[in-house]
């Protein structure tokens, strides 16, 4: 909302902030207070907004709009009881004020009473000529209830009233996608584009729907139309690049991604994709160059570090890949993907203690994949840490009960540690769960396999 100048050609905001620095209280009309409060709320300066509301109400105690700002602050601070009490007072005074209904619905929504919020918002439709905002709010409440069909219909109403309401367009497409209605979304967007043929957002969304259906030629055409409608639309270039990659037109994809670098600051996504395309084209030097640019542009982008690490793994340059994954871990030591790569690289380099450390860290960070448990346990076995290996597999068994691969490993370990009763128990479990994995005993525990007791159990069950 634009602030209008006062009689002295000074902005009310400037006068207000000047007044705060002195003990002189200046007079502002209620509309000036509204503009000042609106400005502070938009800037996220809640303390200043509250000061303006307090002073405004001291000068204009009957102003409904200023009290509505007070309600808004109460809601923001989650003081819903006070907000509700004040909004009910205002309703008694001005039962036809649409903003009162909107704030009442906001309070109900905050209390997760979305059905009642929708009911109140629908009542407000009879009080306003500007229904688009209300339709949007109703649509959002239906989204909170996971009622995507109803939400979609209200976002459609927004677009019927305003073809430029791109927020409603995005929300509506989200509903289509959640419902898996890609064909219906395409049909709607084509109809929408008949009435608004130069809407780059609609073309962009249409391309994404075709991409989802793997109709890459139609997706490419849609993104081209988005670019024709707005040749600075970076998102359309990025999506077009992805389509060209799917069509294995890697050089064209590189050229498309490179346009985004000219339009704005480089994005790590574009740099990463260019590196991938160069790798596909066997241009090793440029692939590495762009992977390095990716991690320089955004050191927190794990896909960049993973790409350059895997690049060197494919080249079997494990020392180089270890160098880059160590750099990644130094930046983000809580990334489980980094630790798994760290473990795999060290394992290939036969640095078993470091490999075990990597798998252990991956488990600590919540990577409970069966292969992580098995690989870590097998490494502990190789380095002679039998008790730690047993503990590892017992933990794994909690996540994967009745798993033969785990049971046979436990059997072999217990026999190795001369705990034959436990070894026999787990060996029989393994045979019961899946006897095909009995070869684990022979491969990982040859000394155990040669024991007469073990052979007897195996023969009896196989």
Image (cartoon, helix red, strand yellow):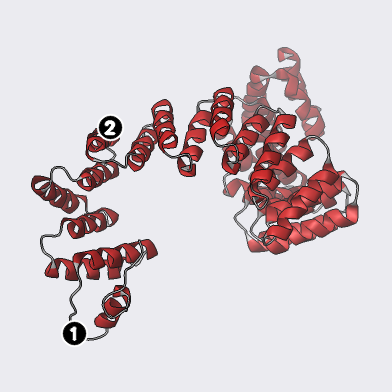
Tell me the distance, in whole angstroms, between the alpha carbons under discs 1 and 2: 48 Å
| Point 71% across, 46% down: residue | 380
115 relative to 256, above or below: above
Image quadrant in which you'd find residue 196: top right
Q: Are marks 1 and 2 in contact (CB under 8 Å)?
A: no
Does 23 sit left or right of 93 as displayed? right
Disc 1 packing (10 Å; few <14; some 14–19; many ≥20): few
Does 47 sit left or right of 157 as displayed? left
Residue 263, position in %: x, y?
A: 69, 58
Lower position in the chain sequence, tag 1 or tag 2:
1
Label disc, if present, on residue 421 of the rendered structure: none
* Number of marks in picture: 2
Identify the image quadrant of the C terminus.
top right
Viewer-side label of 1, 2 = 1
| Point 24% across, 32% down: residue | 119
Disc 2 packing (10 Å; few <14; some 14–19; many ≥20): some
Residue 281, position in %: x, y?
A: 89, 45
Helix or strand or loop: what does disc 1 sit on? loop
Image quadrant in which you'd find residue 293: bottom right
| Point 31% across, 65% down: residue | 46
79 relative to 61, above or below: above
Query: To which residue does mark 1 refer?
Result: 24
Residue 30, position in %: x, y?
A: 19, 65
Helix or strand or loop: what does disc 2 sit on? helix
Q: Nearer the viewer, residue 450 or 295?
A: 295
Q: Nearer the viewer, residue 441 or 23?
A: 23
Does 148 sit left or right of 263 as displayed? left
- Any part of residue 64 in sight: yes
Query: To which residue does mark 2 refer?
Result: 115
173 relative to 458, above or below: below
Identify the image quadrant of the N terminus.
bottom left
- Any part of residue 307 in sight: no
């Amino acid at each position: 909302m634009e602030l209008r100048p006062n009689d002295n050609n000074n902005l009310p905001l400037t006068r207000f902030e000047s007044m705060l620095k002195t003990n002189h209280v200046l007079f502002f009309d209620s509309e000036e207070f509204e503009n000042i409060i609106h400005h502070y709320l938009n800037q996220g300066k809640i303390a200043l907004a509250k000061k303006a509301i307090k002073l405004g109400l001291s000068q204009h105690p009957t102003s409904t709009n200023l009290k509505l700002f007070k309600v808004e602050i109460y809601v923001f601070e989650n003081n819903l009881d006070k907000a509700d009490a004040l909004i009910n007072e205002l309703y008694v005074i001005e039962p036809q004020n649409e903003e009162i209904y909107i704030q009442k619905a906001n309070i109900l929504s905050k209390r997760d009473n979305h059905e009642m919020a929708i009911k109140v918002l629908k009542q407000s439709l009879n009080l306003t000529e500007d229904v688009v905002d209300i339709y949007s709010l109703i649509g959002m409440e239906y989204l909170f209830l996971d009622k995507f069909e109803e939400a979609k219909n209200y976002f459609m109403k927004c677009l019927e009233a305003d073809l430029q309401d791109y927020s409603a367009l995005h929300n509506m497409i989200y509903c289509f996608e959640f419902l898996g209605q890609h064909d219906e979304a395409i049909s709607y967007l084509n109809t929408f584009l008949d009435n608004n043929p130069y809407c780059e957002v609609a073309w962009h969304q249409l391309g994404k729907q075709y991409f989802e259906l793997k109709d890459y030629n139609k997706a490419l055409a849609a993104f081209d139309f988005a670019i024709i409608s707005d040749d600075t639309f970076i998102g359309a270039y990025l999506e077009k690049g992805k389509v060209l990659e799917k069509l294995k037109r890697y050089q064209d994809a590189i050229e498309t991604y490179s346009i985004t670098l000219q339009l704005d600051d480089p994005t790590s996504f574009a740099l990463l994709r260019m590196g991938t395309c160069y790798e596909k084209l066997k241009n090793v030097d440029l692939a590495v160059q762009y992977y390095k640019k990716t991690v320089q542009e955004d050191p927190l982008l794990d896909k960049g570090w993973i790409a350059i690490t895997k690049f060197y793994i494919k080249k079997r340059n494990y020392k180089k890949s270890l160098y880059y994954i160590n750099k990644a871990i130094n930046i983000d030591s809580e990334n489980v993907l980094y630790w798994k790569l760290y473990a795999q690289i060290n394992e290939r380099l036969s640095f078993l203690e470091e490999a075990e450390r990597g798998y252990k860290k991956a488990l600590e960070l919540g990577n409970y994949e069966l292969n992580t448990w098995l690989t870590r346990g097998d490494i502990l076995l190789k380095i002679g840490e039998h008790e730690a290996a047993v503990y590892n597999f017992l933990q794994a068994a909690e996540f994967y009960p009745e798993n033969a691969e785990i049971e046979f490993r436990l059997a072999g370990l217990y026999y190795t540690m001369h705990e034959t009763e436990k070894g026999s128990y787990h060996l029989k479990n393994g045979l019961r769960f899946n006897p095909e994995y009995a070869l684990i005993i022979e491969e990982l525990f040859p000394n155990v396999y040669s024991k007469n007791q073990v052979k007897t159990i195996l023969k009896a069950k196989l």
